[in-house]
């Protein structure tokens, strides 16, 4: 409802501005129709809030909420933050755009100064480039992505470890809000070339051989002739496999590690003890339309093979279909469990974990499980896979396998 109200405020402000400037009758009619079609209740903005200034900041945020880097990106990020800082608190609450909202700059996601972007030069001849999708949640970036990077660095003291993110949208967010510069894949590869790196190992922190992994491989292939050797290690869950029944050692290790962590954080003596209390653990992955989506079904198979009768695998995107929130709710009910613990099956506990899983909006998993009315309690554990020591060891082993 908040977004609807703010949208009407912005439409109203645009209408006043257009009329004052002698706008055409067609434009005024379109604005009026937009206002009339909304079912939101119009509320006057606070008297000292300037809606037009908030709209301009929203435009600046939308301009950097993109996946492509340009020569203007850093200047645009700086301009967006300066414009945000110049707003009053009341004006900040009115910032709404296609992607922009008050949380873009205003949400507290932890201390960015604790993070090491690993974008230093003086790399040497041997580099391990740890490539992640990324997250703008500072605490998760430090604990989850940083945890994996540090584990790899400690296991390979003769190699320089550097970072790259594949999500430019996230890189821009961190740069604009925290003035922390993180390399995208092209920038990281250019840095390696400029530093005279001869042997490059790329360690993806991605969950599987999905779309992000494919795009990474294309980028790395384009630089293959610039190094003496280039090797790419396996993502977390290893090879995909041919069908839902096929599992592997990596999936087994991850399944055991994440369940053990969830049980411990939940304060239970064991998974069976939790089941006896009617507790089900639901692990929420991202989901994908890529053929690698069978990986999520394989993780459910792995949980079943381990005898984890109160563990369920779902996805935000609902792909594969059986992993949608509605289907998971039905599965948990059919199994007779009355209490639910939600936890992300993602390397980082970022936007999906905090909003899609644990958020207060009606379409979050917490809200949908609660609204179903079948459960006595719905709790959330907001923590990524990357912070679990046994998961970090898998990445270390994958790196070691290609060295």
Image (tube, helix red, strand yellow):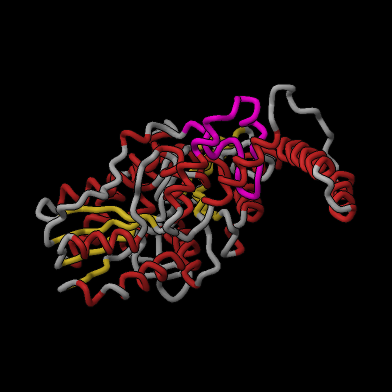
Instruction: Count the labels in the image.
Output: 0
Furthest-front residue in view?
A: 22
Left or right of 163 in this view: 176: right
Which quadrant of the structure image shows residue 52? top right
Residue in view at x 62 percent, y 52 percent: 325
Q: Report if residue 83 lies within the magenta region.
A: yes
Name the one closer to the observer, 327 or 388.
388
Q: Quadrant of the N terminus?
A: top right
Q: Report if residue 78 lies within the magenta region.
A: no
Note whether residue 270 is visible. no
Left or right of 97 in this view: 146: left
Note whether residue 210 is visible. yes
Residue in view at x 26 percent, y 48 percent: 118
> Height in image: 24 above or below 14?
below
Left or right of 122 in this view: 253: right
Q: Quadrant of the C terminus?
A: bottom left
Furthest-left residue in view?
A: 158
The magenta stretch is: 81-108
> Height in image: 189 above or below 89?
below
Residue 369, percent from left and from top: 64, 42
Name the one closer to the observer, 128 or 397.
128
Residue in view at x 64 percent, y 37 percent: 95
Residue 254, percent from left and from top: 36, 53
Residue 172, percent from left and from top: 45, 49
Name the one closer to the observer, 11 or 256.
11
Residue 106, percent from left and from top: 53, 32
């Amino acid at each position: 409802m908040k977004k609807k109200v703010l949208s009407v405020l912005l439409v109203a402000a645009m209408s006043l501005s257009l009329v004052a400037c002698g706008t055409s009758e067609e434009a005024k009619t379109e604005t009026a129709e937009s206002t009339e079609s909304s079912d939101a209740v119009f509320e006057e903005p606070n008297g000292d809030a300037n809606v037009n200034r908030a709209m301009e900041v929203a435009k600046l945020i939308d301009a950097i909420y993109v996946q492509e880097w340009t020569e203007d990106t850093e200047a645009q990020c700086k301009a967006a933050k300066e414009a945000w800082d110049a707003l009053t608190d009341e004006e900040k609450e009115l910032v709404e755009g296609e992607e922009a909202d008050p949380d873009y700059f205003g949400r507290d996601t932890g201390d960015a100064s604790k993070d090491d972007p690993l974008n230093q030069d003086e790399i040497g001849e041997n580099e391990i480039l740890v490539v992640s999708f990324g997250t703008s949640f500072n605490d998760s970036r430090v604990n989850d992505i940083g945890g994996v990077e540090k584990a790899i660095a400690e296991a390979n003291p003769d190699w320089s470890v550097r970072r790259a993110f594949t999500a430019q949208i996230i890189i821009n967010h961190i740069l604009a809000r925290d003035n922390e510069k993180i390399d995208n894949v092209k920038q990281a590869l250019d840095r390696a070339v400029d530093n005279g790196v001869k042997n490059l190992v790329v360690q993806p922190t991605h969950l599987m051989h999905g779309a992000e992994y494919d795009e990474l491989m294309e980028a790395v292939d384009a630089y293959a002739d610039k190094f003496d050797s280039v090797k790419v290690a396996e993502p977390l869950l290893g090879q995909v496999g041919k069908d839902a029944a096929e599992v592997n050692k990596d999936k087994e290790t991850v399944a055991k590690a994440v369940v053990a962590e969830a049980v411990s954080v939940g304060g239970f003596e064991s998974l069976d003890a939790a089941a006896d209390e009617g507790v089900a653990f639901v692990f929420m992955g991202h989901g994908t339309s890529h053929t690698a989506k069978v990986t999520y079904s394989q993780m459910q198979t792995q949980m079943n093979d381990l005898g984890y009768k109160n563990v369920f695998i779902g996805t935000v995107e609902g792909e594969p279909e059986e992993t949608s929130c509605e289907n998971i709710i039905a599965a948990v009910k059919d199994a007779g469990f009355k209490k639910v613990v939600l936890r992300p099956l993602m390397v980082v506990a970022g936007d999906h974990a905090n909003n899609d899983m644990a958020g207060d909006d009606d379409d979050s998993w917490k809200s949908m499980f609660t609204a179903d009315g079948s459960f006595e309690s719905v709790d959330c554990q907001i923590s990524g896979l990357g912070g679990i020591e046994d998961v970090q060891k898998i990445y270390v082993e994958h790196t070691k396998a290609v060295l």
